[in-house]
Image (cartoon, helix red, strand yellow):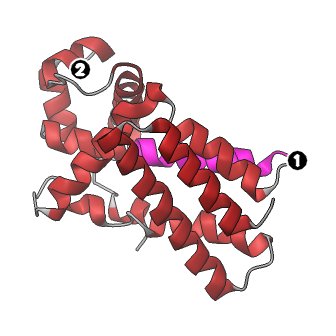
Amino acid sequence: MTGDDARATPDAGHGARGDRRAELVDAAVDHVVAHGIADLSLRRLGAAIGASHRMLIHYFGSKERLLVEIVWASERRQRELLSRLRAEPGRSPADVARLLWRQLTDPATAGQERLFFEICAQALRGRPEAAPFLDGLVDSWLGPLAEAEAEAGASPAAARNRARLGLATVRGLLLDLLATGDRAGVDAAMDEFLRMYYGSE
């Protein structure tokens, strides 16, 4: 089951209710990207995106469930960015990887990356609101990443292995950046990884 299948809910994508729910998630993601997650309460978030506390509870059930939805939407946006970068002519796979890395490590998006790891930690502890987040956490990325590797000439098995390695490296370095704040060191490590991964490209 893909991450999107695992996240399907009775409310999502059905009529006006689903549309309003999606609008609220998009607005919440924009707010988190712009302002981070410090002191993020449902009341403050609702006021910032034009929704009441009760409306957010109505659509999402709890703050924790809304945070999971925000992370899922952020991940989906990142995969869409990857697709756009890959579609632009003249860009090598290494160029695409560098541009995506630059976007992921933009200080303006640090809040959503921090939230990603917080939700991961809650899910691994078995918190019921966060546990579904683990569904598709890896598989949702392996498809598009393996596709890019296959287009570069890798066999299906090698493409999937390389995709998993790349995903794990990026997430590990993102956690390193959040934990240490060593932007120069993390960027240098990513450059070295890309040289090993793609050769001298």
Badge nearest the viewer, 2 or 1: 1
Return the x and y of residue 60 as percentages of the image width and height: 20, 39
Return the x and y of residue 118 as percentages of the image width and height: 22, 46
Marks 2 & 1, CB-CB < 8 Å contact: no
- Residue 65 is drawn in which quadrant? top left
Task: Looking at the picture, tell me which residue is in the foreground, 135 or 171.
Answer: 171
Return the x and y of residue 184 as percentages of the image width and height: 52, 38
Q: Residues within 10 Å of mark 1 (few under 14, many from 20)?
A: few
Q: Is residue 182 above or below residue 138?
A: above
Number of numbered discs on residues: 2
Figure quadrant of the C terminus: bottom right
- What kind of secondary structure does the magenta stretch mostly adopt? helix
Is residue 148 something that shows in the picture? no
Figure quadrant of the N terminus: bottom left
User: In the rendered structure, which amino acid carries the disc numbered 1?
Assistant: Pro
User: In the rendered structure, which amino acid carries the disc numbered 2?
Assistant: Leu
Look at mark 1 in the image and give the residue it sits on: 89
Q: Indicate which disc residue 45 carries.
A: 2
Query: Is 80 one of the magenta-colored residues?
Result: yes
Give the residue displayed 29% in from the left and 40% down from the top.
115
Return the x and y of residue 157 as percentages of the image width and height: 62, 87
Classify mark 2: helix, strand or loop.
helix
- Residue 163 is drawn in which quadrant? bottom right
Q: Magenta residues, as a range?
A: 72-89
Give the mark nearer the N terminus: 2 vs 1.
2
Give the residue displayed 42% in from the left and 38% down from the top.
182
Q: Is residue 48 left or right of residue 44?
A: right
Q: Indicate which disc residue 37 carries.
A: none
Give the residue displayed 28% in from the left and 58% down from the top.
133
Give the residue displayed 51% in from the left and 72% down from the top.
164
